[in-house]
Image (tube, grey):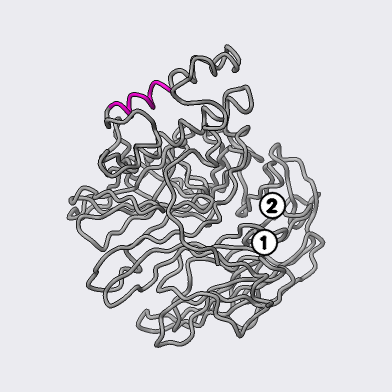
Amino acid sequence: MVPEQSHEFSPRGDKTANTFSFLEYDKAREKIPESTRASVDAWREEILAICQAHGVDHPSKLVLAETHASIQTLERVQNLLDDILYVFEHQELPTEKKKEVEPVDDREYVVELGELLENPCNDIRVYDHNGRFYFFDNHANPSRLFDHEGNKDVLPSEMIYQDFVLLGSRLVLVAKKRMEQRSWKFLTGLDGEPLDPPRDFNTYSEIRDHLVTMGEGTWGEETVYPVSKDRTIHWETPFDLKGESIIVDTALIDGHPYFLTSKPWMIYTADHQPVGNPDGYAEKPVLCDRDGEFTLLVKDRDEKNPGWWIYDKEGNPIKEIKTTFTIESAMFINGQYFFTARKETEEVLLNEQGAELWKNSTGEQIDKLLPCHSGFIFSTRTITKDPFGADEVDQNYYDQQGRPIVWYPSVYTSPETPPIFVGDSYAFIIQRSENDQRQNVQHRSFPEITIGTFERVYVMETIDDDRFYVIGLEKKGDKTYQVAKRVYDTRTFKQ
């Protein structure tokens, strides 16, 4: 385990100091292309203005407590420094596609919450970015926002916060009035203040786990803004619902959103152009990303092409899938399709040849296909109905060969994080008993070892082939808690 450390605020990787002195800029400026200088000048001037406003002469000093720099201000300066560094290293302006993948921060962090009256598990929401994280705590009133280094902002007391999202490259909060009954929500900065211009919406719903929609307007005249899996809001691609249409599925493929509506089954781009058959489909289509290309699956009633077929964006048939089951979801990975399908109470996992890779037991339903390492895993649910509405739901995870990874009976609290593949097998979260609600980290290769214990796990991600990290809530003492990031190396389990 990596020892806990404290870290000064600095550009990621701390390379800026090695490239040029921030205050000796004029000489360094001559080394970058003339076409980039105006942008870099503007970024530098913004950083200097922030420094001047906080009474310091260098951005590295902004983290000092007496400057009272907010988390939002520190994050803005961090992003500006990263963009300047990119220009000096690459001799061009950064774009989202050209920016290098940021390495995962493999250090541990601990943020103390102080004394609380009860367990705040359900009141904390974490946003993780490559091992650095923010979280807000709604357990307290007013709510509080922390970063991974323990910097804290007290948020406006009249608001309660629901989620983190990205507005372009800016991290913002989804909020609502604390005492207001209606569901109307809006976006705020990390200081909790509403954005200018305002960004308001009336729904925030998740569809098929890979794209979230944010809507504004009245029923039947709603405008929907998609949010991708990395929580980036795409305000530039709004979709206007017309008439009685309802969005039942969405997909974001190569940066372009697609919307599946009912009444009838139609697929649209954000500018309301139909995709595939312009007259729609009698059966519900399934949307699928084929390595950045839009494809769809539909049961074709045309006598020339009976059965299930894969079509491209223009509606041209690609391949027939020979199955008598109804296909419900699809994933393209490692050069081939995989499908979940149903016939009455039977559920199966199929490959593109129609072969069954897994078949359910009584009542078990496939829930999600999830990318994992170089393949995928899938989760299932077994629902036991209760006449009074208190249904019991068991959850299972399987690998892509249909072999079980972990089982969560209904009396346990299902974790927010799925299993991950690291150290040649799977790491996962498990609860010991119905009466012990703590969540333990385990690895399938070493079932006798409890790797770590948390009150609640919020994030579990890989660092490399052998290491991974967990962000969760730890109980420090009586009524005291801390949010901690712990780093684990599977090679040490074998010793």
Q: Nearer the viewer, residue 411 or 56?
A: 56
**Which secondary structure class fits the magenta region best?**
helix
Secondary structure of the residue carrying numbered label 1: strand
Instruction: From the top left corner, tell me how far across and down residue 214 is, in percent.
Output: 40, 45
Amino acid on which disc 2 is placed: Leu
Q: Nearer the viewer, residue 298 or 60?
A: 60
Amino acid on which disc 1 is placed: Ile
Mark carried by residue 327 = 1
Query: Could you say which quadrant of the image residue 94 lies in?
Result: top right
Mark carried by residue 297 = 2
Q: Residue at x 64, y 82 (%)?
A: 361
Image quadrant occupied by the C terminus: bottom right
Residues tagged 1 and 2 counted as in contact (Cβ below 8 A): yes
Verify whether residue 70 appears in magenta.
Answer: no
Query: Could you say which quadrant of the image residue 487 lies in?
Result: bottom right
Verify whether residue 49 appears in magenta.
Answer: yes
Residue 493 falls left or right of residue 469 = right
Task: Identify the magenta region.
Answer: 43-52
